[in-house]
Image (cartoon, rainbow, N blue to C red):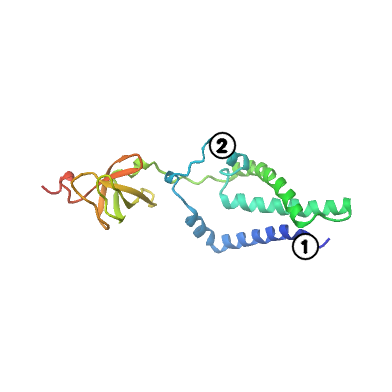
Amino acid sequence: MSLLAAHNLPFVLALAGLGVMALVQVTGLGDVIDGAADFDADGGLELGGMGDALLSLLGLGRVPLMIWLASLMLVFAAVGLIGQSVIAGMLGAPLSAGWAALFAGGAALPLNSLAMRPLGAVIPKDETTAIELDDLVRRDAEIQIGTARPGSPARARVIDVHGQAHFVMVEPHDTTTELRTGDTVLLVRREGPTFYGVRYESPLLGLDS
């Protein structure tokens, strides 16, 4: 049975994708992709109990996403190619590409999840750079878009202790002032998702009378 036959197309494509992923890692583009895919969990992505349980069931979170995906593609391709060969020997002909991909995908997910458990135990864990929103208080922020007024926050950019940028909504701490685009302010407190800041020339900082 030819590896390049039409009924094996999904599994050949999976192997090709695995090769592309390996090339990306070897050339260093993986670091760029990982950086572009980073997100701030404090920005609101919270899956809750059901979502966390599903991710745990799939083995996500035990290993880096790229490793999980590469393993899934390898398991999918192996299950599909071996399964097609076995079915062709038993029935005289393999399944169509669509049905074979469906069955192989259904088998690959739990098998990949099982593989992630021992793999996750031996892969070194990266130190997390996640922070709490309150850790941004007492840090400088630059107003990026809009004018911040009492009750009407503007978007600002603040760099955390790890050098990562966060975008937060800021209102003036002093209700008699406005914070304009380009102003650099000190974040002095937070209420819910909104931060309150003062310009460095503000009397609240004791720099001016």
* Residue ID at (77%, 55%): 81
Residue 23 versus residue 137 in the image, above or below: below
Q: Would you say 73 lies left or right of 161 here?
A: right
Numbered-mark total: 2
Residue at the limit of the structure toward the front, as seen here: 151
Percent position of residue 63, x then y: 58, 46
Q: Quadrant of the image for the N terminus?
A: bottom right
Disc 2 target residue: 50
Q: Would you say 24 lies left or right of 111 here?
A: left
Percent position of residue 198, x then y: 23, 47
Percent position of residue 29, x then y: 53, 62
Query: Label 1 amino acid?
Result: Ala
* Residue ID at (48%, 56%): 35
The crowding category of the residue bearing disc 2, from other C-alpha atoms within 10 Å (few below 14, some 14 to 19, many at least 20), is: few
Q: Would you say 71 lies left or right of 89 here?
A: left
Image mark for residue 21:
none
* Residue ID at (25%, 55%): 180
Residue 12 versus residue 38 in the image, above or below: below
Residue at the limit of the structure toward the left, as seen here: 209
Query: Label 2 amino acid?
Result: Met
Disc 1 target residue: 6
**Tags 2 and 1 touching, CB below 8 Å:** no
Comparing 126 with 73, the one in front is 73
The crowding category of the residue bearing disc 1, from other C-alpha atoms within 10 Å (few below 14, some 14 to 19, many at least 20), is: few
Q: Answer with mark 2 or mark 1, whichever residue precedes in sequence.
A: 1
Comparing 173 with 30, the one in front is 173
User: Alpha carbon of mark 2 to alpha carbon of mark 1: how far?
Assistant: 38 Å
Secondary structure category for the residue under label 2: helix
Percent position of residue 93, x then y: 86, 56
Secondary structure category for the residue under label 1: helix
